[in-house]
Each structure stands twice: as C-alpha cells, then as structure tokens.
C-alpha cells in the first residue's frame, strides 16, 4: 500500500478532506499533517487523526510564513511516530517547503509532489517580493517530481510563463468525488420554482469574495424578491467588513451554514436553480484562471452556472454551450441577463446541462486508483534514478579495490 505524507495549509478546508478521501479510495494510506485556521468538524476524515503543526490566520501571509518556519524547526519531533512515506505531497508553497524538510528528515529518494490549486497574488507581483517568492518556489520545486494543478489557465498563464518550474504536470480538476454508485447514476431533475416562489441562486463553498456579496445583494434588491440568494459554506471573515451584518440586512439573501462535501451536495444544489460560479477575490489573476469547485458541483447536480466574461470558467461554459455568462460584473448587467428568465428559458438551460457527459463533473473510484497509480509510478522512477546513480559509484569502488 502506497504511504502518502500529505502536508496541508488548512486542516479545516473541505477540499483537503475531499483529496484525502480520493487518495484513500485509490488505495493509499494517508498521513495528514498541517495547520488549522478554524474548527470545522465537517472537514474531519473518519479514521485519520491529523498531525497539527500550529494555527494560522486568513490573509496573514507573514504570520503563516513565521508559523511554517517554527514548524520546520520542530518537524522531526512532530513526525517521530510516522513511518517513512513513499510519497510526500505539499499543498501550496508553504507546505512544499515543509515537504522538502520532511524528505531530508526521512532521508532517501522518496518523491515530492507540489499541489498548487491557487496562484497567490504575491507570486505575480513584479517587484522584489514577487521575484523572491518565485525564486523560493523554484528552489523548493526543484526537488519535486510532479506538479498537480486544477486549471489549464494556471499552466498557461503562470507555470509556463512565470514560475520557472520544469516539472511534469498532472491536471486534476476540482471535480466532485462520487464514490457511491447510486449517487453517480442519479440524474438531476429540473426544478423551476412553484408559482409565486422566487428563483434561487446558490453561492456555495469558500465565501471569500466581497464584490460577489455586494453584487448579489444589489441584484436581489433590484429584482424585489423574484430572486433569492442562498449562501452556504465557510465565510472568510477577514475578507469582509462585516459578513454577518450584510447578510442579516439583505432582504433576499440568507446564509444557511456549512455543509459536508461531497455528502450534502445533492441536497443543497437540488434546492437552487442557478449556481454562482464567479469569484472576484483576485480579479484578473487567480480568479480569472481558476475552475472552481462549484462549477463541477452545480454541473453534476443540475444547477445552471453563471460565469463572467473573460474568465476560464466562461471559456469552459462557452465550449460546451451551457450556462449563462455575465458581460460585466455589476448588478445591472446581471439583472439584464436574468431579469426576464422564465420557466421556458430555464428549462432550455437545464436541458443543455443535463445533456452533458456526467464524467466531466465527477471522479469515481477508478479515477482515484488512477491518481494513486500515477503517484506510485513516481516512486519507481525515483528508484530507477537512484540505481543509475549507484552504478558509477559501484564501478569507482571496484576500481579502488583492484
């Protein structure tokens, strides 16, 4: 059984839980280690007791760097009970640094995998800070055997143009983990609202976009109750002036709390007609390049996605002739896009979604096995390299004996 040591930035992140479940479903033994930003029981993985390396805070990059540096100094002690792993994965740049440190502690040639699912805005700065961070990434990434990333735009717009990393790349999209055969087989159903009831737009997942919150509030007020905005997930409170107050004061918006991913997805997406697949958190950069979890979740469960023009998400939808694309990111344009929506228009959009191959939205157990096999192949390559390096040394030793 392949043993993976997985370093993560946030043990409370539901996406971390999904990746651990995926690796386990593929047949791997996972040791999870990382930092915690808040408490989230819904992100716990049954049977996995994580190694907690400390606490970090959202939007506090300097604090996180300090926490990682302190953890690196104590990492040998933290890993004292961990068996030597076959592969080490570092989920983002800070965790890549710890992955390198762990490799030096264990010794040997186990491969490191760099998992990068967001491009931090500091990496894109054209100043001393940006250049220093990219140099740091190149330094730690030079020891990696594989790069895992989730969007083609990350590869085209950052890794090939700016990073300087020369690594094999595996595209691992943010698809829904669907291990239950019954759940995979269940096709979504159309759900136009009953007479007199509002259309619903669901904004689910990592709620970190101040601009989206304001835009959706403004739009729903303009529509005077014809649309309701349903928020679910984990608000990044550091990114909002007062998230709770804004939602409390919004007449047509409500926050329904956290949920379990993937177990609760069918229920929460089945309660809305549309999915907000937009993120202005790092507008023009990471937010324009990513393919968000909610794109795949809404696609699998029949919620019609809404994207904004000029983004990778919009290109994804346009290539499949599905969803709605917003010309400009403001409430008047959203009102023009959706204001005249009726049952006929909704059903046409839903049917276009339902006609798509469901495999593009989800990963099943076979995909999980494929991922773990790809990671296992890195160990074979590492062993072969070690063997090739040992042969000249063996000849030199024999030459000295003769």
Image (tube, rainbow, N blue to C red):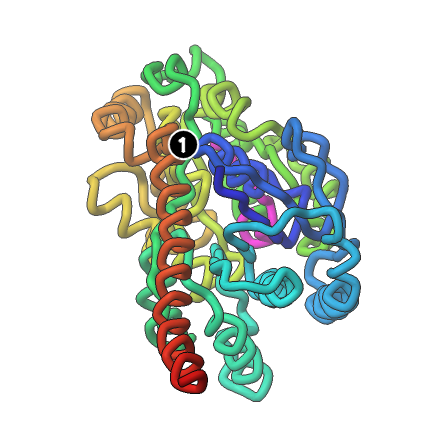
Q: Is residue 173 left or right of residue 12?
A: left
Residue 130 placement: quadrant: bottom right
Magenta run includes residue 381 = no
Q: How many marks?
A: 1
Q: Is residue 354 left or right of residue 362?
A: left
- Say above or below: 101 vs 53: below
Q: Residue furthest front?
A: 402
Q: Is residue 22 left or right of residue 254?
A: left
Q: Position of residue 266 (x, y in %)?
A: 47, 21
Q: Position of residue 49 (x, y in %)?
A: 71, 36
Residue 277 placement: quadrant: top left
- Say above or below: 156 vs 258: below
Q: Position of residue 361 (x, y in %)?
A: 34, 34
Q: Residue at x 70, y 57 (%)?
A: 58
Q: Residue at x 65, y 37 (%)?
A: 250
Whether residue 146 can be seen here: no
Q: Position of residue 241 (x, y in %)?
A: 73, 54
Dividing the image into 4 quarters, which one contains the C terminus? bottom left
Q: Nearer the viewer, residue 357 or 323?
A: 357
Magenta residues span 201-212
Q: Residue at x 56, y 73 (%)?
A: 122
Q: Nearer the viewer, residue 256 or 165?
A: 165
Q: Is residue 160 left or right of residue 205?
A: left
Whether residue 157 can be seen here: yes
Q: Residue at x 32, y 46 (%)?
A: 325
Q: Nearer the viewer, residue 324 or 126?
A: 126
Q: Which residue is mark 1?
A: 298
Q: Secondary structure at mark 1?
A: helix
Neighbours of disc 1 within 10 Å: few (<14), some (14-19), many (20+): many
């Amino acid at each position: 059984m392949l043993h993976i040591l997985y370093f993560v930035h946030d043990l409370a992140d539901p996406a971390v839980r999904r990746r651990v479940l995926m690796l386990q479903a593929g047949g791997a033994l996972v040791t999870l280690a990382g930092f915690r930003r808040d408490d989230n029981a819904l992100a716990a993985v049954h049977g996995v007791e994580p190694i907690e390396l400390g606490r970090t805070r959202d939007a506090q990059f300097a604090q996180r760097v300090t926490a990682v540096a302190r953890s690196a100094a104590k990492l040998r002690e933290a890993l004292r009970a961990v068996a030597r792993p076959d592969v080490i994965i570092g989920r983002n740049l800070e965790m890549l640094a710890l992955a390198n440190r762990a490799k030096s502690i264990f010794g040997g040639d186990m491969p490191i995998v760099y998992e990068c699912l967001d491009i931090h805005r500091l990496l894109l700065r054209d100043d001393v800070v940006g250049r220093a961070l990219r140099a740091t990434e190149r330094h730690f990434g030079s020891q990696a055997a594989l790069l895992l990333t989730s969007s083609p735009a990350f590869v085209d717009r950052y890794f090939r143009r700016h990073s300087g990393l020369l690594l094999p790349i595996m595209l691992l999209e943010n698809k829904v983990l669907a291990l239950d055969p019954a759940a995979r087989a269940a096709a979504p159903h159309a759900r136009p609202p009953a007479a007199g009831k509002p259309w619903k737009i669901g904004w689910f997942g990592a709620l970190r976009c101040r601009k989206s919150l304001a835009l959706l509030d403004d739009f729903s007020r303009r529509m005077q109750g014809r649309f309701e905005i349903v928020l679910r997930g984990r608000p990044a409170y550091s990114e909002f002036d007062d998230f709770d107050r804004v939602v409390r004061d919004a007449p047509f918006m409500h926050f329904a709390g956290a949920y379990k991913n993937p177990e609760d997805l069918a229920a929460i997406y089945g309660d809305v007609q549309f999915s907000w697949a937009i993120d202005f958190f790092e507008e023009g950069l990471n937010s324009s390049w990513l393919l968000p979890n909610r794109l795949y979740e809404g696609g699998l469960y029949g919620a019609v996605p809404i994207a904004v023009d000029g983004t990778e998400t919009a290109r994804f939808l346009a290539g499949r002739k599905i969803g709605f694309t917003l010309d400009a990111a403001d409430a008047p344009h959203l009102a023009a896009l959706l204001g005249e929506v009726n049952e006929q228009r909704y059903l046409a959009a839903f049917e276009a979604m339902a006609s798509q191959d469901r495999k593009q939205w989800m990963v099943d157990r076979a995909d999980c096995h494929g991922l773990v096999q790809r990671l296992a192949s890195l160990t074979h390559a590492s062993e072969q390299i070690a063997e090739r390096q040992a042969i000249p040394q063996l000849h030199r030793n024999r030459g000295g004996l003769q």
